[in-house]
Image (tube, helix red, strand yellow):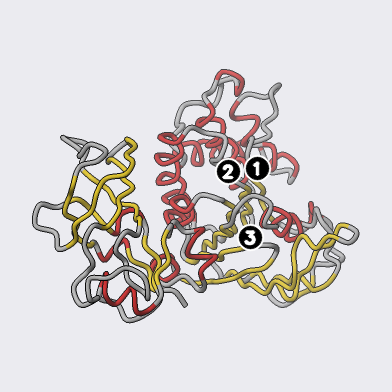
Amino acid sequence: MSLGLNGISVRYGDVAAVSEVDLAVGDGEVVALLGPSGCGKSTLLRAVAGLEVPSAGTVTWDGADLAGTPVHRRGFGLVFQDGQLFPHRDVAGNVAFGLRMRRVEREARRKRVAELLELVGLGGYQRRKVTELSGGEQQRVALARALAPRPRLLLLDEPLSALDRALRESLAVDLARVLREAGATALVVTHDHDEAFTLADRVAVMRAGRIRQVGPPAQVWRSPADVEVARFLGCGKVLAAGEADRLVGVPARVGLRATALHVSSDGPLEAEVVERAHRRDHVRLLVRLTTEPAGTGGESGAGGLLGEEFEAVAAIADPPEVGARVRLSIDPDGVAVIG
């Protein structure tokens, strides 16, 4: 069983929110729609769900056009950013809602609810009021409710974005496990790189209503399709092929993430610290090269890198002060080859 999007466009008057999108989601596959706010990813998800009518193209399931199929008959489960739980029902009542609508008998409902609450890490929460749960617990209930009727496709629209960073990271790992153990076929909308790469088998990067790149997370991360995708994926500096060959030994256009350069006592590059800012597990630096990389002739301009500013990272313990001279090493994991 598979989802197919063929030339999907969605327009609001003269505004094209989604333009000519082609995408497939295979049986048991999790695909993440990743992109900045306003790029059209949630609109595309709503078109799949039947909540938006495409102005062009088709949404198919196993090749059958779903244009005439209403939302409640598509067999898709939905999880939104705020969970949209029923505040007057307890946890069990929320999870069992779809089963009641399908007239599943009481004992089967009870067993399915208990099974799913165990799966999402809320075993024994059946009688809890949802209004007394934390944000993370509410999203787990929403996920269990969506999974209860065994949907053929699960649609998740920014399911973790309302949570704080630490909880989001923890719950993303749990959500990835739940999706795998449930064997779910899922389309996940997110603007968070870490979330997409944790959850998905494939990532589809969207920008300005179009899908710019689709591939396994590692491939997308290491080889962005173009400069715009590279910048969205954290490459603050883009180097032409000649510059990249001199600096990082890659004879191609590259994007450098902050982690590409790190302070190291025996590094081959020398720089001056211009700015610094503390992060949770490292110190982020802005540095200015004070010597040219080997083989550049020692001059700035004409492709030279002397005086150029780059991001770099240092350990939290005893980070360099602004104005300090440091040596830098290159970490290939922070280098992305573009195109």
- Horizontal arrangement in the rendering, residue 189 relative to residue 55 (left or right): left
Instruction: Give me the C-alpha separation between circle 1 and circle 3.
Output: 17 Å
* Location of residue 310 with respect to 138 vertically, above or below: below
Which residue is at 34% across, 52% downward?
Answer: 311
* Location of residue 265 with respect to 116 vertically, above or below: below
Name the amino acid, label 2. Pro
Residue under label 3, please give it.
152
**Which SS class for mark 1?**
loop
Is the Cβ of the residue at disc 2 closer than 8 Å to that at disc 3? no
Name the amino acid, label 3. Arg
Residue under label 2, please give it.
159
Find residue 33 and report its horizontal and vertical position in percent: 59, 59
Residue under label 1, please give it.
80
Please identify, in this view, whether the residue under mark 2 or under mark 3 is nearer the observer: 2
Instruction: Give me the C-alpha separation between circle 2 and circle 3.
Output: 18 Å
Instruction: Give me the C-alpha separation between circle 1 and circle 2.
Output: 6 Å
**Which SS class for mark 2?**
loop
Find residue 1 and report its horizontal and vertical position in percent: 61, 71
Which residue is at 41% across, 75% downward?
Answer: 240
Which residue is at 64% across, 35% downward?
Answer: 82
Mark 2 or mark 3, earlier in chain: 3
What count of labels does the image hold? 3
Name the amino acid, label 1. Phe
Is the Cβ of the residue at disc 1 closer than 8 Å to that at disc 2? yes
Mark 1 or mark 2, earlier in chain: 1
